[in-house]
Image (cartoon, grey):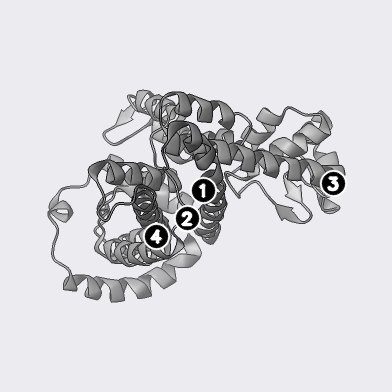
Amino acid sequence: MIFLIPVLVVVAQQVNSFSHAFPQYIADLVPKGIGQKLKAYRNLSLLLNPKTLGRNIIGNALFNATDTASKALAVPIDRAIGAFTGNKTRVLPQVAESIQGAVSGARKGFNEALQGIDTRGLGQRFDLQGNRSFNNPIGRVAETALDIGLRVPDRTFYEGAFAESVANQMAAQGLEQPTQDILQRAEQEALEAVFQNNSKISDLTLNLRKGLNRLGVENFGLGDIAVPYAQTPANLVQQGFNYSPLGLVKGVNNLVQGNQRQASLDLARALMGTGIGYGGYELANQGLATPTQFSDNYQTNKNIRNNLQVLGIRPDQIGDYWYAPFQPMSIPLAAGIATQQGENPIQAGLNTIVDLP
């Protein structure tokens, strides 16, 4: 962060003058408590760096590409189910509408980032504030930079997924205008695309943080220190399970409940994730991939660890590349590698989450 200060000072003058072009929001007039400022400073310290911003974009893009392939695979599965139910809930991914939505989302996200607002609430992914916490120019520019780096990509992929889902459902049902049910389902699918959906695991994690936050000041407590980012890691774990044979159970459950559209995607994701896991198995079998953990000696003996690292041998690698950050695809990949190595595949998948900064 220190090396960014001279840059922020220069940019502050430009953005500070540019900000006068926007109306004064009521939120800016509300006094900012110490808890809100502590949370904002924590986010700037942990997230405003090239690695985090880059991984956010790459991770969203990788999941979007893989999930688009899963949605394509879900179409024949939907047809097979429809042979018994008489319903059709999917067509091939509507790429043109997805691109149009993504472009619109990028534009909206960028404009809102400059204004310091978040009309979609997607900043909750990293516990970003809905409005600025600092009044000094450097603090405001830093928050704007973080919003541009995180909110804009999330808004881009969210709007793209929303537009694709609406178009896909309308085409499957032969409708010219979306119904309220279509819009509600599209909203849930779009939130899932950026890991902001409600799930049992995320609810559990958020409740844990809420309980720990009883110790602290207003808007900041022990939970914000122990579990700084709850929803995204929890939903990454959930998607990791979806992209595994365990996803078959979820698919069957949704099918029994009559949710054919979600069931077809669950089954497709399970098959896709199983294929990724098999790819990891084969890479490990050929000596091209390393597991998430080595022997106990590697974990506890610093000399052994350092010697292996000098040789370029580290956990979580395919060749010279660290695969753990590419969530959630790295979860089934790690499980496949662990299976070949005789390790616990579930533990290996979870390690890819735990090992992240």
Q: Which residue is nearer to you in this view: 36 or 357?
A: 357
Residue found 24% across the figure and 63% down from its top: 115
Look at the numbered disc 2 and give the secondary structure of its residue. loop
Residue found 46% across the figure and 23% down from its top: 256
Q: Identify the residue position indicated by label 1 in the image.
A: 71
From the viewer's perspective, is the residue at label 3 or at label 4 nearer?
A: 4
Q: Identify the residue position indicated by label 3 in the image.
A: 308
Marks 2 and 3 sit apart, C-alpha to C-alpha, by: 45 Å
Q: Which residue is nearer to you in this view: 26 or 265?
A: 265
Quadrant in the picture for the C terminus: top right
- Looking at the rendered structure, the kind of residue marked 1 is Lys
- Looking at the rendered structure, the kind of residue marked 3 is Leu
Q: Quick check: 141 above or below 345?
A: below
Pointer 2 with pointer 3, Cβ within 8 A: no
Task: Assess disc 3: are there few (<14), some (14-19) or many (≥20) residues with their C-alpha within 10 Å of its C-alpha.
Answer: some
Compare marks 2 and 3 and give the one earlier in the sequence. Answer: 2
Looking at the rendered structure, which numbered label has been put on residue 93? 2
Pointer 1 with pointer 3, Cβ within 8 A: no
Where residue 352 appears, as percent x and y from the top left, is 64, 40
From the viewer's perspective, is the residue at label 1 or at label 3 nearer?
A: 1
Pointer 2 with pointer 1, Cβ within 8 A: yes
Look at the numbered disc 3 and give the secondary structure of its residue. helix
Compare marks 2 and 1 and give the one earlier in the sequence. Answer: 1
Looking at the rendered structure, which numbered label has been put on residue 156? 4
Task: Assess disc 4: are there few (<14), some (14-19) or many (≥20) residues with their C-alpha within 10 Å of its C-alpha.
Answer: many
From the viewer's perspective, is the residue at label 4 or at label 2 nearer?
A: 2
**Relative to residue 26, is residue 201 drawn left or right?**
right
**Relative to residue 123, is residue 306 drawn left or right?**
right
Where residue 250 appears, as percent x and y from the top left, is 52, 28
